[in-house]
Structures are given as structure tokens and as C-alpha cells.
Image (tube, coloured by chain):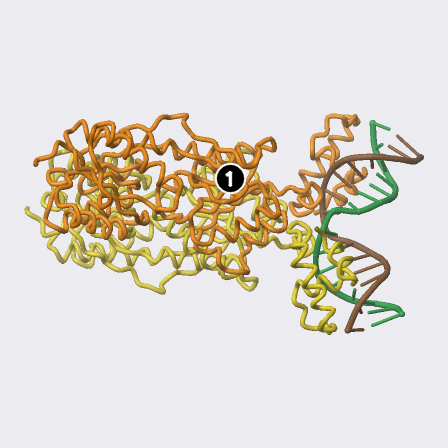
Chain colours: A yellow, B orange, C green, D brown
Amino acid sequence: MTISDIAKAAGVSPAVVSRVVNRDKTLRIGKETRARVQKAIDELDYAPNAAARSLRSASSGLIAMVVHDVTNPVYGEILRGAQQTAGALGKAIIVSDGSHLDDRASRLLELIGGNGVDGLILQAGGVNSDLVLARAGRKSVPTVLLQAALDTNAHLVCLPDSRATQIATDYLLSLGHTRIGCLATGRELTFTRNRERGWRQAMELAGQSVDAGSIVYGHPSIEDGRASATQLIEANPSMTALLCFNVVAAIGALQAVQDRGLRVPDDLSIVAIHDIDLADHLSVPLTTVAMPLFEMGARAVELVSDKSTGFEGTTTIDTRDPELVVRKSAAAPSR
Amino acid sequence: MTISDIAKAAGVSPAVVSRVVNRDKTLRIGKETRARVQKAIDELDYAPNAAARSLRSASSGLIAMVVHDVTNPVYGEILRGAQQTAGALGKAIIVSDGSHLDDRASRLLELIGGNGVDGLILQAGGVNSDLVLARAGRKSVPTVLLQAALDTNAHLVCLPDSRATQIATDYLLSLGHTRIGCLATGRELTFTRNRERGWRQAMELAGQSVDAGSIVYGHPSIEDGRASATQLIEANPSMTALLCFNVVAAIGALQAVQDRGLRVPDDLSIVAIHDIDLADHLSVPLTTVAMPLFEMGARAVELVSDKSTGFEGTTTIDTRDPELVVRKSAAAPSR
DNA sequence: CTGTTAGCGCCTTCAG
DNA sequence: CTGAAGGCGCTAACAG
């Protein structure tokens, strides 16, 4: 079913059909001619060909979004925000796990190189990000980086990272903790550094010292969280509280403590960054700091779709301040 | 950078460049001509335009996948499987939350109507599914339905649903339970009926009766699980075990039991369908039946991409039999 | 063996 | 107020 089939059926020219379909305001057309066209469209169930449109308009209505792991509920929330805004803007989202990018034949890479997407949202820090990015950069596909700057021309969207760890640390401090360890995320990531800064500042302001051994870096997975937490606990026997930069890692930390026959919060308090529904239903309900993840996804789509967005900017999502969600994993120290 | 730019730079015709790019085997070309073309491609960083290719080839390399809720880890696992296979087939996946489909201007609908996607994978049962489906059906976009048949021409992919509930019920029966309730999913869904059947059969085989009040239907969310479980518990005071058709709902059920000051598994045993990482870290580690979700996602992509797949078939994923994962939420009844 | 040509389906001038 | 025509970038068939 092409536009000229409709034109023929309605006894008009293709151009008229095109204008009817696209609601061209400048088109003055006889009332019943329009009706005839509309009828043909409806009866023949015409829908404009997507590829032809993209070719003509040099725009696909598609946004590529690369996240580390679609299974992680934290990233799911970002995706939800992105979906919502994309829907409102009449765009669809192509999602990819970071892990499938190394494939040279990756369709996503082809799309990015060949104008097949209008924009790219990248949760940076993955091993393979560089590849996509280099490609996108050279082709000048509008790009926004989530949370972590890379050495490239792209807009950066940040969460109030240092505020979040400050809030968490202040809370632990107010509970009476002084030896507060950090289960951080990847050392090379911008947001890790910001969160680390928030923690250090809060500690300093309270006159507490932190030594090098009280922070350890790892991936935001249960397994890695468990291993890293174990390491941290062993290296710092006097530590009474643990600040986790990611809820998922915190779940592993919880496990690590329990594995050693210790209890949360009695023997070790835990506070994690990022709030998820499930936090309330864990073996020990986790006290967290909620971050505006949904908003971040939404904002990223807006930015990447907005022609006026320059490269190299930085936007911090602070529509909602990070919010402490008190549950059961943090309490006054028992020693 | 178009194909003729490259042709000019290399002093050949566009057709030659096209053939080089597409590795046309029948092309006999001078070794150094080929090198010249390749050099131009590399230096000018040429990548073929995606829209033009799609237009010409009538295929987009895109698959649309609609799931109820990207945040649900169960669905995330399906998506992961889909991603993996799509990557291997050189396709990308457009993901959409079911909730964004009502928007008339939805880009996804346009794409489906206008040949913008090569296939559609739909987790059926959502309120708005009908819309997409009708569209896809009329346009004969290859479609595969996940888990639940709708009244339409589409291939259906199923999990071993009745086996799963049989296994779960048998396990509870073997523990000594006789009054086993069911926290089911949407009543109208095919897989709900299959799971219900598995449960009934297992009960019958064990000579146990089930009465109408011992099954209740709800959405796979924590909140709904909690509400439905409460209802079930109140209506069946003698019930000692609960079989949940979805882990996420089971988490709500756990909460419901605890809200009433009762304990799992002492006062009520719980077994849930679908295993997720987090199940091990909940307030009571959930005993589950693991289903091949990843495989289902992978298979759905294969089927939708395979031209030889007929409409109206049914494929059951049984590469891996459902597997009981024993944790702590089920034990012998105390009464 | 390589180059020319003719559309794929659409939209946007520009004539009529 | 409506129609005709060109071209977006690519590739498959045909000439040279």
C-alpha cells in the first residue's frame, strides 16, 4: 500500500494524500475531496512507509539507549523514565545491553554510523562504550552520557551524587558512627568520584578521619558486592558502618555480613544509594538514599532530542533532592 | 558521506563501492582498485545510510518487543535472552512498556504499520495489546506472542507452565501440605490457565480437593500480591501453603503474612514460579521454580526472524525443565 | 570486469 | 487550490 495507491483510489495526486496524512495546514482542499482521500486511507489501511520517511526527512524517530544490564532494577527505572518521555515526543527506544556491543556486526553500530538513530544515550563506563562512542562522535550523533563523563564530545547528565553520599554519611554520623567504610562503584567513573567526595567531605566536617583502606571499588552486582564487602570487613575490623554506592552491591554486602555470622545493623550498619521497591523486602530492609532515576531517564531523552542542546554541557538532575529512606539496616553502633 | 562521495574519491562508480561494502562474492575487481575503494571508505569514514538501505531492502533489522513492565526482573531476563539472540542475528530491539501504547501518536505503532520493524514480540494480556496486534496483523508483521494466546494470527511461545506448578505442588504435597492455595496471575491469560491446571492435577492425583475459594487472581506486583494474599488468607484459615504464580507477587504475599504477625514457613509455606537472584536475599529466602526465561526471549527472536515460521504455531520452551530451587519459604506444616 | 540506470516510497518545491 | 517532478542514498539488473 503506497501513497500513490491511495492517490489513485481517491482520484487525486500523491502530493495531496501526503498533505492530508501530514495534516498540512496550508492545504486548502474541498471538503468532500478530503473525505474521499480519508476514506481511501482508512479502507486500504494505508500507513506511510517508515524507511522512505526516514530517508526523506533524515530522521528516524529512534533513540538508542545503552545500559550495562537490563536486569538491574536501578537501570530499569532509568529506562522507564526514558520510555515515558520518548513516548511523549513520538520516539521509540532501541535498548542494548552493553555486553552486546563488541560484536562487530552489531546492528546498533550500523544504525549509529548510518543515521539510523536520532540520538544516543549511553550509560558510560562499560568496557565497550568506547567503540560506540567513537563512532557516534565522528558521525556527530547527538549523545548524552549518563552519570559519567568520558573523554568525548557529549552532554553529561548527572545525579546529585555528592549530596546523596553526604546525606547518607551525615545520617550514619548522627547515629553515632565514626568508622564508616565505603563500598564504591568503578573507580574510573565520574559519579564514583563525586560520591566519594560527598562521603569524605561529610566525614571531614564531622572531624572524622578516613584512611585509604576504608574504601573499596567494585561492580554493582550481588556477587561483587559480597566479595568487596568481605574484603572491606576483614581489612577494617573496627568499622561499624558501611556506605554502599549501589543497592545491588548492598544486597551482596548484607550477605557478606550474615556469612560471617554477624548481624545488620547490630554489628554493621548499611546505607545504600538508590532506592528500589525490593529494598523493603530484603532479609534486612535496607536504608537507602533515593535518587531521581526516572527523571534522569526522562531528561536524557529530552536533551538528546533537543536540537538546541549543545555538545559538552553538563546537566544535573536535581528536580528531586536525594531522599533518605529509613528502614532497618542502619542503627546506632553497639561498640 | 554518501556512496557516491566514496565512488568519486576512489575514482570508481557507486555500484562498485556498494559491492565492496556488501562483500559481493561475484565481484571481480583489481586488487589495487579494491584497496583504493577501501582506503576511501576508511579515510572518509563512510557508513551506509540505514534508511536508504531499509527502503531498498524492505527490511529494517529491527524487532519490536513489548513487555508489561521493564522494571520487573522477570521480564528483564526475557529481554536479556532476546538481546543476545538479536545480536547474533544482526538485529536490534526496540523495547516498549505496554503502558505507552495507548498514545495514538506512538512511534511504535507507526513503525509496525509502516514496515519499520521486521517483527513483533508481544507479551500479551496487557490492556492495550489489542491495538498493536490488530495493526500488526493487518500489516502482516511477523508476530510472536509470549506465554498467552490471543485471538489472532500469531505464533505462540510458551513456558512449561503446567509442569512448573505440578512440580511446585508436588513438593508442597511431599512436605505434608494438603490445603494449598493459589495466588494466580490474570485469569484470562493462557499461562494462568495452564498453571492452574498443573496445580489442580497435582492436587487431584494426591487425592486432595480444592475449593473455589482457594485460588485468587491478580497482577504480578508486590502491592497486588500483598492484597490478594491477604484476601486468600482470610478466606482460607486452614490453608498451610501458598503457590504463587509469580515471584514478584510472592514478595507481596510474604509481606502479607508478616503483616498479620504470622511467619513463613512456620505458619504458611510459600513456593513461587520464576527464580530471580534476589529471591535468595529476601526476608525469607523464597523457594521457587526456575523457568527458562532467557531461552524464551532468545527463542522468540529466532522465531520472529525466521521466514519459515508459520503463523498460528505454538512453541513450548522446554530446553530446560522447570527446576525447583529449594530455599527457606516452604517447610512441613505445623498444623 | 566495471559503469549506468532505474526505481524503493515519500515529501517539498514549483508550475499550473 | 491541486498536480508534476526531482531527489533523499542505495542496490539489482542491465549495458558497455
**Residue B333 position within the rendered picture, expressed as x and y whole percent measured from the top left:** 11, 34
Q: Chain of mark 1?
A: B
Q: Could you tell me if residue A232 is visible in this image?
A: no
- The residue indicated by pointer 1 is B144
Q: Residue furthest left?
A: A335
Count of marks overlaid on the render: 1
Specify the quadrant that holds the C terminus of chain B: top left
Considering only vertical position in the picture, is A248 above or below A53? Answer: above
**Residue B74 position within the rendered picture, expressed as x and y whole percent measured from the top left:** 35, 41
Q: Could you tell me if residue B154 is visible in this image?
A: yes
Picture quarter containing residue A325?
Answer: bottom left
At 42% from the left and 48% from the top, the residue drawn is: B125
At 70% from the left and 47% from the top, the residue drawn is: B1
Q: Amino acid at mark 1?
A: Val
Q: Is residue B236 left or right of residue B249?
A: left
Considering only vertical position in the picture, is C9 above or below A33? Answer: above
Q: Is residue A263 left or right of residue B21?
A: left
Nearest to the observer: residue A194 or residue A8: A8
Q: Residues within 10 Å of mark 1 (few under 14, many from 20)?
A: many
Considering only vertical position in the picture, is A208 above or below A217? Answer: below
Q: Is residue A173 left or right of residue A2?
A: left
**Residue A74 position within the rendered picture, expressed as x and y whole percent measured from the top left:** 34, 48
At 15% from the left and 37% from the top, the residue drawn is: A258
Considering only vertical position in the picture, is A207 above or below B208? Answer: below
Picture quarter containing residue B62?
Answer: top right
* Element at label 1: strand
